[in-house]
Amino acid sequence: MQLTCIALGLDHRHIYGMTENMKKSGVECLGFWTLGNPETLGGYVKRFPNIPRFDRLEDALECGADLAMVSAIPADRANLTVKAMQHGMDVMSDKPGCTTLLQLDQIKAAVLKTGRIWSVNFSERFETPVSTRASELVAAGAIGKVVQTVGLGPHRLNRTTRPDWFFQRERYGGILTDIASHQIDQFLHYTGSDTAQITHAFTANYANPEDPYLQDFGEINLRSEQGTGYIRVDWFTPDALPTWGDGRLTILGTEGYLELRKYVDVGGSEGADHLILVNQSKSEKIDASNAGLPYFSRLAHDIEHRSETAMTQAYCFTVMELALLAQQMAEAE
């Protein structure tokens, strides 16, 4: 069976990886639709010159594709998701998959009514081979029972290239809804938790008073029956760092720990996907760059076989719900 996909919205660069990795999984991209001409459009056309553009959203929705990849402005993703499902498509959304609890309820209702799959591409896990290798080591018991994760998600602001919606709270959804959904996903995944309790959530604008609706710092504490987690996200990456952010994850187990230096190893090895393993028998640094990205082929399998190998639907709902609840808690204080 030849699976096909389309892209709906090119407002975030994650659409590059989403498209590339689905193509590598054997899925044919029939075209893309986006509103206007976002800054990312030129890069998309350069990377994928053979993917045509749909002039009208209606034409994209009626093309008969199996999967819609949604990377529009965050506040618009839920509406496009529901429309795609109503036209018979499964959906892979960029994170955040939605920006309000009402939108999440609308997506849940659409999934229930149509039987379509809603999957959110948490790229800090799904697009980093080091996360794949960490999953294998945790499953093999290399560090014992996981009892805590510490997830750090620093990002570079890149103010001059940011569109207006990036600075509008109602459009981007808040820093915890947006960036921290990655780290919530990682906490649940590596601790093996079905859900969690948000015990603390905080946001601030420390360094950008001229943009009062931007949140440039956020943190979350959470716990489950399996363990606890701490999350810090921010827009403070210094210009001297050779990439957009020094994203890291520490996974603490009862018999050792893992540290994932996903994008850069400052003062250490070149490249990305560096994994540190320390347990009772070894202390080593592993090049995990060849560990693969199984999420995309698993999603293709799920589309064809109506299975849940990439992630369960309940899990996807839970991650986004926790991110939205954390955002709500932080802003209520």
Image (cartoon, grey):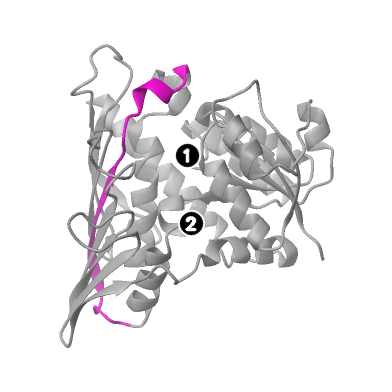
Is residue 157 one of those drawn in magenta?
yes
Point 39% across, 20% down: residue: 167
Q: Residue at x 79, y 26 (%)?
A: 56
| Numbered disc 2: secondary structure | helix
Q: Quadrant of the C terminus?
A: top left
Q: Which residue is mark 2?
A: 315
Q: Nearer the viewer, residue 17 or 126?
A: 17
Q: Which residue is mark 1?
A: 96
Specify few, some or many for label 1: CA neighbours under 10 Å numbering under 14, 14-19, or 20 or more. Answer: many
**Above or below: residue 237 compared with residue 230:** above
* Relative to 315, 142 lies left or right: left
Contact between labelled residues 1 and 2, with CB atoms less than 8 Å apart: no
Q: Which numbered marker is on residue 200?
A: none
Percent of width and height locating residue 148: 22, 62
- The Cα–Cα distance between marks 2 and 1, rounded to whole angstroms, is 14 Å
Q: Residue at x 28, y 68 (%)?
A: 275
Residue 295 x %, y %: 54, 62
Q: Is residue 14 above or below residue 191?
A: above
- Picture quarter containing residue 194? bottom left
Q: Nearer the viewer, residue 325 or 38?
A: 38
Look at the image and tell me whether residue 254 can be seen: no
Q: Is residue 299 left or right of residue 96?
A: right
What's the amino acid at mark 2?
A: Tyr
Q: Secondary structure at mark 1?
A: loop
Between marks 2 and 1 in the image, the one whose residue lies nearer the viewer: 1
In percent of width and height, residue 296 lies at 59, 60
Badge 2 crowding class, 10 Å Cα cut-off, few under 14, some 14 to 19, many 20 or more, is some
**Residue 324 found in image quarter:** top left
The mark total stands at 2
Q: Which residues are magenta?
A: 141-164
Q: Quadrant of the N terminus?
A: bottom right
Residue 158 in sight in this render: yes
